[in-house]
Amino acid sequence: MEEIQVVRATEPPSSPARTQPPGRAPFRIGAVQQRWHRDPDEHQEALRAGIEIAATEGARLVCLQELTLSPYFAVTPGGPEVAGAAPEPLPGGPTFEFAAAAATEFDLHVHASLYERAEAEDGLGYNTAIVVSPAGELVARTRKLHIPITAGYYEDRYFRPGPPGEDAYPLLRLGEAGLGLPTCWDQWFPEVARAYSLEGADVVVYPTAIGSEPDHPDFDTEPLWHQVIVSHGIANGLFMVAVNRTGSEPPLTFYGSSFISDPYGRVLAQAPREKPAVLVADLDLDQRRDWLELFPLLSTRRPDTYGPLTKSRAKSRE
């Protein structure tokens, strides 16, 4: 098994906008960056090793990459039958069972991602993030809202968008921390981070599978990916956890670089591009309060002017 680098950020930096003592204890979170292993047992053991490291470091929640147990099969436009991708029942199914076993063994919450079966005639499933408790219970399920349609990321051939309405932005409470659990392509949309912030999230976790662009092989999007997520955190007073995969799955090469940032835009911990890693960080949850009191970005919004955001636009105007 490859050596796993551990990146620790267990002493939160000071909160520059703080005017009163924190009312909540730090929340320790872990994130495991891994490549996909062709042998299923080897792959699960590599993930389990990362979870064990995070547990040993005292993490209360450990976060895993998008489509945790599978290859990133959406590289082909042929759909599930051509790719050999099988949607899973939930609860039950291999991803839930793996997360439940790890959560129980290491006595922490485990976040994972899977291709969830949907009862629909078109054969499309959901791209779903879950959290399983130390008791082995499913305590969170969030379905990816935005579905990419670009070369190498043909997710519209596999996944249906998550539901609109009240179920679109569910919030998970773990102790005093509020968490939102969108997925990958959702991270590019400012509306997602804003919606979770308005719901009271402190932390947003994005399981991710992003890397090279087959149609633009010389264009490295990692700096843009990094910047947009950090900026959403600043604009909404959020800690951001982006947990990407690494390694080569032709025609894609994933660029890893998983990271955790705070509401001030400071990167607390970051993984390398090409190696497995475990990130462990203490989140000073009341930094959200401090920053949004100094810069009241939520209370000074103008929802009465945002009607154009909900109107459909012709593709020629994008």
Image (cartoon, rainbow, N blue to C red):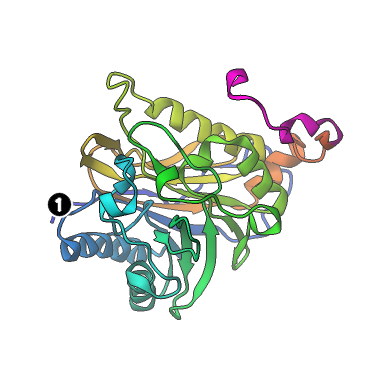
Image-based side of 59 in relation to 23, left or right: left
Camera-side residue: 134 or 8? 134
Residue 138 x, y percent position in the rendering = 49, 73
- Residue 224 lies, with reference to residue 288, above or below; the image says above
Q: Is residue 122 visible?
A: yes
The magenta span reads 304-318
- Which quarter of the figure has residue 223? top left
Q: Which residue is mark 1?
A: 2
The quarter holding residue 251 reads top left
Residue 315 to residue 162: above or below: above
Q: Main secondary structure of the magenta part?
A: helix
Quarter of the image for the N terminus: give it. bottom left
Asked whether residue 237 is in view, the answer is no
Outermost front residue: 121
- Residue under the image location 65 percent in, 51 percent down: 286
Per the image, is 183 magenta?
no
Dot 1: element: loop
Q: Position of residue 301 (x, y in %)?
A: 80, 35
**Residue type indicated by callout 1:** Glu
- Give the total number of marks visible in the rendering: 1
Residue pushed farthest bottom? 135
212 displayed left or right of 302: left
